[in-house]
Amino acid sequence: MSTQEKPEEFSNRWGIILAALGMAIGAGNLWRFPRIAGEYGGTFIILWMFFLVVWSIPLLMAELAIGKYYKKGTIGALGRLGGKRFNWMGVFVTLVTMGIAFYYSVVTGWSFRYFLLNTQNLIDYVFGSGTMNANFADPNVNYMDNFWAQLSNSSWQAVLCYMFTIAIAIWVLGKGIKQGLEKVNKILIPTLFILLMIVAAFAIQLPGGIEGLEYLFTINVELFKDPNVWIQAITDSAWSTGAGWGLMITIGSFSRKKEDVTLNTFLGAFGNNSAALLAAMAILPAVFAMSATSGDAIDFLHGGNTALVFTVLPQLFSQMTGGPFLSWIFFGAFAMAAFSSILPMMQLIIKNLTDYSISKKRAALITGAACFVIGFPSAWSLAIFENQDWVWGVGLLVSGIFISFLIMRYGPAKFKRDFIDDNSDFKVSAKYFSAMIYFIFFAGLFLVYWWMDQGYSEYPWFDADGNWNVFDTFSNASIVTQWAIALIVAIVFNGWFYKKFVKK
Amino acid sequence: MSQAAIIGMVICLTITFGGFLTFLVIALKSDKKKSDAGLEE
C-alpha cells in the first residue's frame, strides 16, 4: 500500500463513450441477442428498445453521474451516496460484478482459442490442403462438437487461454486509463463494428439470407400480449447494456468534471443496441442461408448460446465457399467484443483497490491473480461456469434494485439536479427520471422473482432426499446461498469497508 | 421479403440506428461548438 497517484481521466467524451461501448458490447450481443431476437422478431426488438429507455438508460445515467461526482470506485461512490447504513449495498454490487469478471475471463479465453482455431483453418484453407475445413464441415467427423466438449471440460487449453486473457488485460490496464483502456478501445470498437458489417453484408446476400432478416424483423402484433416477450426484452436490455453492474460508475470515476452525463449515456446505450442489431443481422441470415431448411435454422437458434457460437456457426461457415474467411472475421469480432468487456470488469476491481491506496500496477496484479484463482473452476468445468453465469446474472438485477433504492432514498429529482444535469447539453425531465427509478426498483423485484420461478432446476430448493440443493447448476438454493455469502461479507464488514473505501 | 418484414425492418432500424446517429450528430456538434468557443482542451 502506498503512493498517492495523480487522478486519471479520459481525454475527452469519446474516451468515455468508447469505454461504455466496450463495456456493453460483449459476448451477449453476439450469442444471446440474435437468438432471442430471432425467436420473437420485430416485436421483441421494439420492446427491447422501449426498455432501453425505460430501464437501462436511467440506470446507466445515474451510475455514470455517481462515478463522475464522487470520483471513486463502486464501494466508495455508492457508500458515499448511501451513507454508512447502506454501504453494504455498494459492496454487494461490487461482489456481484467481481463474480461475473471471474467467469467472464473464461469466455474471453474461449473466444481467443476459437479465433486461433479459425486462423489455423483459414491458413490451411488458403495455403494448405483444406483438410481442416473439410473436417469442420463433415457431420460424421463431428469436429466442432468434440472440440467444444474438450475445451469446456477439464481442459488445460482453456486454462491457458484464460490465463492469456488475464495477462493481456493486466498489461493493458496496468498502463492506465489514457494509455491503456482508452487506446485499446479506440482500436477495438471501430474494428468490431466494421467486422460485424462485413459479416452482415456477406450473410445477407447469400441465397436464403433474406429469410433470416424476415425472422428478425417481422412484427407479430399478437406477441405484444405475451408477457414472456416483455420479460425477455427487459432482461436482455439489463444484461446487454451493463446497467446496474457498477461498471458505468467505474468509467464515470475517470470522467472529467465538465463531461456531459446525459448525452454520453444515450450515445453509449444506443451504440450498444446498434451493435447488437448488427450482430443479429449478421448471424441470423448466416444461419438461415447455411442451414438445409428453415426448421434446421430455428433448431440451431434454440440450441443455446455456447452451442450456437462454438459448434453450429463454425460448422455452418465451413460448408460455404469462402466460409473460413467469414468465420475468421466473425470470431475476430467475437474475441474483440469479449475482451472489450472484460477490461472494464477488471478495471472495476482495480479502481476499488486503488481507492484503498494500493498502487495501480499492484492493484492490476492482485486483480489478475484473483481472476486466475477464482475463475479457475469455471475454466475447468462447464457446469460451474453455467452456475456462475446464472447466479451472478440474476444477481445483477439485485444490483440494479440496490442502486435504484439508493437514488430513491436520496430523491430522484434532487439526484438528477445535483448529479446529472451539470454540463449536460440536453436534459431529460425530472418526472421521467423519477418514474423510471421507481419502475426499476419494483420491476427489478418482480424480475428476480420471475427468473427464480422459471423452474430451470428440477429441484429448485431441496433435492430428492430433502437436502438443501446448493450444488445444482440452476437451483434457487445455489443462487440464494451464494448471494447470502456475498451479503454476509458486505454486512459483517460494513464498518471496515466504509472506513477504508468511503471515508478515506 | 414480405411487406410486414420490410415495415418491421424500417421501424426497428430507424429507432436503433437512427437514435444512435442522432445522438452521434448532437455530440459532434456539441464538441465543435465547444471547440470553436475555445472551451475544449
Image (cartoon, coloured by chain):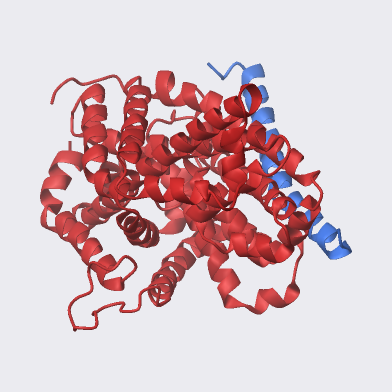
Chain colours: A red, B blue
Total count of labels:
0
Which of the two residues, A212 or A19, is positioned nearer the viewer here?
Answer: A212
Find residue A399 and report its horizontal and vertical position in percent.
35, 57
Residue that appears at 15% across and 60% down: A488
Percent x, y for residue A319? 68, 44
Q: Position of residue A63 (x, y in %)?
A: 42, 46
Q: Is residue A205 left or right of residue A109?
A: right
Is residue B26 in view? Answer: no
For residue B9, side relative to residue A273 (left or right):
right
Residue A455 shows in this picture: yes
Query: Is residue A379 positioned above or below A222 on the image?
Result: above
Q: Nearer the viewer, residue A191 or A154?
A: A154
Q: Quadrant of residue A77?
A: top left
Q: Is A195 rendered above or below residue A127?
A: below
> Where's the C terminus of chain A, which quadrant?
top left
A450 vs A233: above or below: below
Residue visible at 36% across and 29% down? A169
Q: Residue at x 15, y 53 (%)?
A: A494
Image location (x, y in percent) of residue A64: 44, 42
